Image: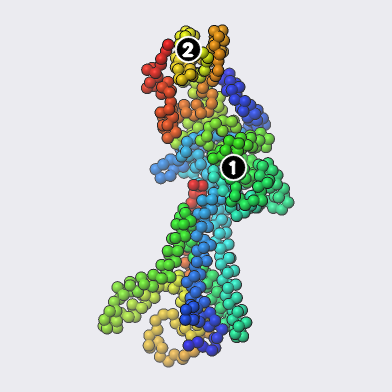
Amino acid sequence: MKETYQNVCDGSPKDVGKTSGGGTGMSEDNRNVIEIAHLTKQYGDKRAVDDLNLSIRKGEVFGLLGPNGAGKTTTILMLLGLTEPTAGTALIEGLDCARHPLEVKGIVGYLPDNVGFYPDMTGRQNLRFTGQLNGLAGQELEERIDGLLARVGMTEAADRRAGTYSKGMRQRLGIADVLIKDPEIIIMDEPTLGIDPEGMRELLNLIRELSVEDGRTILISSHQLHQIQQVCDRVGIFVEGKLIASGTLAELEAQILQDGSYLLEMNVHPCDDKLLGMLSQQEGLEKIQKEGNTLLITSKKDIRGQLTKFLGEHGYTILHLHQRGGDLDEIYRRYFEKAGQSDERNDFEEKRKPVWKRRGRNARKGTDRA
Amino acid sequence: MKDSNYLFLSLYTTSGNSIPSFMSFIALLGPIIGLALGFDAVNSERAAGTLNRLVAQPIYRDSIIIGKFLAGTAVIAAIIYTMGIGIGAVGVLCTGVKPSGEEALRILVFLTFTVVYVAFWLALSIWFSVVCRHAATSALASIALWVFFAIFMSLVASIVANAVYPIGDEYHAMVNSYNNYTLNLGLNRISPYYLYSEAVSTIMNPTVRSVNVVTMDQLVGAVSGYLSFGQSLLLVWPHLTGLAALMLIAFGGSYIGFMRQEIRSN
C-alpha cells in the first residue's frame, strides 16, 4: 500500500511539502496533545456526538471531515469547555476541558466559522482587545500585533474599520486574532468556507506554515475535502456524531481498497472499438466501461504500467490517466456508502453517478464488456 | 400649591401646562435609556460572530455579562447624575435660589432612585437580548413591557380591583372602597414605573406623609407639618428595596440565561 501512497503524492505535487512537515513535527515529539475519550453529547433525543475517541499528536494537522450537522462544531465546543459533555472526557495537554476551561483557552486558539469583529473598531483595535483579554499589554502587544498583521497580509487594512472588511480579510484577521495568544493548539471551524480561490491558497499556505514552521498542532473541521486534503497529516471522517474512520490518507485508502478494487480513468486517442476489444484481452482487467470519451477500467491490481506499455506499443496516445480512490473525495464518498449515509450531497451525487458506481444494484447489468 | 420652604425642590416637581415635570418625564422616558443600552447587548454580538470569539478567550464567562451590565449602569449613572445636577445648576443660575442641605440630599436620593430604576430596565433588556435570537425581537419585547407598565398596568389594576371589590353602588362603595383601593395600590406597585413614581414623589415632596390609605381616626390629632428627610426616606425604603430586588432579579435572569447558554455562531 506504500506504493499507492507514493502514487498519490506523485499525482499531486501539493502533498509533498505537507508530508515532510508532518514528518518533522512527529519525529520531534510524539505525545498526544488532544485526547478525547468516549465523548458524548446529547441534545434531547439527538446524539450530536456519540462515543467519540480520538487523539491528536503534537505538531499534527488533523482534519475533521463530515457533512453539515455531523457534530463537528459540538465536538469543538466541548474541547474548548464551552459546552458540557453528556459523558466522556476531553483532555488538552492533560487538562480536562470541562473542568479547566480557562487554562485550556489560554493555550488553544479558536477560529470560529463566520468569525466576526467589532465593526466600529479598526482591525488593529480588535486585535489589541483580544490581546488584552489574554493578559498582554504595552510594547510587547503592539509588536506582536504588527508582526501578525504583516504575517497575514493585513498591514495596509489594519487601520480601517473592521466593518468594511471582506469575508477573506475577516478570515485573515481571524487568524491573526487566534495567533495573538501564541497558542500551542489551533482549532479552526470551517476555515475555508466562502473564500475565493486566491484567498484559499493563501489560507492553506498559512496553515501549513503554522504547522511546519511554528510546530503548532492544528485541528481543522470542514466539509470541503479538497482543501483539507492539501494540508492535513491525518483526517477523521465524522458522520452523525461517530468517527467512522481516521488515519492518514494512505491508511484510509488502504482500508477502502481492501474491499474494493482499483478504478482507472483514462482518455486515449484514437478511442475506437478495436481498442476496447484489445483492452478486454488484457490480464487483470475486471470490466471496462465507456463514458463519453473516458474509459473507466476496473481491475484487481494496479495495471497502469502494464497498460501504458501496451498502448504505447500499439500506437495509442494517452491523453489522461488517473487512478481514482487516491483523493479524499473518493475516500469520503466510499465511506459514506459504507456507512449507509445519504445526506443531500450524496443523494445528489448518487443520481449523477455513472452506472458502474451504483454498487450492488446495477454492477452486473451495467457492465458492457466488449 | 408649592411650599416656600422647599422652593428648590419644585424645580424638579413643577409641571407646566404642556410640559411634564422633570420627575415624571424621567419616570416615563428614563427606561428608554436602559432599553437602548441593553436590548442588543448579547444577541447582536452573537449575530456578528464576536461572541464566540470572546468566549474562546481565557476569561470567565460571567465577566462578559457582568461587564455588560456594569458598563451600562455606569453610563446610566453618569447620564442621570449629570442631568439632575445640571438642572439644579441651571436653577441656581436662573433663579438665584440656593438649595438647602436637606434639599440637596433629597435630590441625591431622587437621582439614586432613578439610577436603580433605569438599571432595572437595562437588566431587563439584557435578559431579553440573552433569550431572543434577534435584536429586533428583544427590542420589541422590552418596549412592549415598558409601554405595558407605564400605561396599561394602572388600567389592569383598577379593572381587577373593581372586579374583586366592586364599588358600583353606594352600599358596595362603602363596604369595599378600602379594600378596593388597597388592592389597586398593591397591584400597581408591581409595576416598577408606579413604584418609582410613588417613591420619588414622596422623597421630593416633604408634605407627603403616607403612601398608603390613611383612615380618619389615624389622622385625629395629627399635626400638619413637613416630614423630615429621614422619615421620608423611611417611608420609601421598601420601594427602594423592591426596585433593587426587581433589578437584581432581572439581572440574575440574564446571568443564568447567559451562563447556561451554548454559544454558537449561527
Give the residue type that dot 2 points to. Asp
Question: How far is disc 2 from disc 1 in space, using C-alphas?
Answer: 48 Å
Residue found at the very far right of the displayed protein? A139
A4 to B200, vertically: above or below: above
Q: Is residue B85 left or right of residue B218?
A: right
State the residue in front, A42 or B157: B157
Q: Which residue is mark 1?
A: A168
Q: Is residue A237 left or right of residue A201?
A: left
State the residue in front, B109 or A290: A290
Q: Which residue is mark 2?
A: A272
Q: Earlier in the sequence, mark 2 or mark 1?
A: 1
| Co-location on one chain, circles 2 and 1 | yes
Q: Is residue A4 left or right of residue B188?
A: right
State the residue in front, A235 or A192: A192
Q: Residue at x 44, y 82 (%)?
A: B210
The 10 Å Cα crowd at callout 2, few under 14, some 14 to 19, many 20 or more, is few
Q: Chain of mark 2?
A: A
The quadrant of the image that shows the C terminus of chain A is: top left
The 10 Å Cα crowd at callout 1, few under 14, some 14 to 19, many 20 or more, is some
Q: Position of residue A101 (x, y in %)?
A: 57, 47
Report whether residue A213 is seen.
Answer: yes
Give the residue type that dot 1 points to. Gly
Q: Position of residue A135 (x, y in %)?
A: 66, 52
Disc tally is 2
